[in-house]
Image: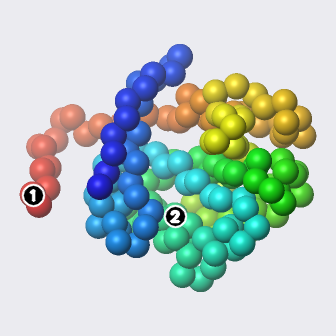
Amino acid sequence: DIALWKFESPKFSFTIIDAPGHRDFIKNMITGTSQADAAILIVASGVGEFEAGIAKDGQTREHALLAHTLGVKQMIVGVNKMDAKGVDYSQKRYEEIKAEVSGFLTKTGYKVARIPFIPISGFQGENMITKSDKMKWYTGPYLLQALDSLKPPKRPVDVPLRLPLQ
């Protein structure tokens, strides 16, 4: 099922729509994504995990394609599990993942130059709400900064309300 969490940053109030990625929940993922103003695409950096997700029928590809198809134009990519054994906060692994995901997102229709790719460790909290000391080589924003740089969409308040029925 879809889970909702609310939190505030210094600039915005956010509602996270956590849409499950497992194939059994694809309908829920579509419902959640169709309501989103922006997407955070979480990409596992673990050896084997990333390769499975970016493979021809991998879920990373599927989620990015669905988000674009459903009109989500703003995206942040979180390169997660940078703390994993074999990754060990490696800049080389981050760059490898960034290059591969960038190529796919470009083919999908995203403007990759506008997408921040943030190396993170959700488990350790690295690069989530503060800059990480373990990835000094990374000079971009941490996740909360990237969220605060999103542009709120313009709402069509001068036209009739469209209401989907399910």
Marked residue nearer the N-terminal end (2 or 1): 2
Q: Residue at x 75, y 49 (%)?
A: 82
Q: Secondary structure beneath disc 1? A: loop
- Indicate the position of residue 81 as horizontal and vertical percent values: 70, 51
Compared across the picture, whether 43 is left or right of 126 comes to: left
Q: Residues within 10 Å of mark 1 (few under 14, many from 20)?
A: few
- x and y percentages locating residue 59 in the rendered image: 52, 70
Q: Which residue is mark 2?
A: 64
- Classify residue 32 as left or right of residue 115: left
Residue 108 visible in rendering: no
Q: Residue at x 40, y 58 (%)?
A: 20
Of residues 139 and 122, the one drawn nearer to the viewer in this rendering: 122
Q: Is residue 19 above or below residue 57?
A: above
Residue at 90%, 40% in the rendered image: 137
Pick out the residue farthest to the bottom: 56
Q: CA distance from mark 2 to mark 1?
A: 25 Å
Residue type at the position of mark 2: Ala
The foreground one among 97 and 1 is: 1
Pointer 2 local density, CA inside 10 Å: few below 14, some 14–19, many at least 20: many
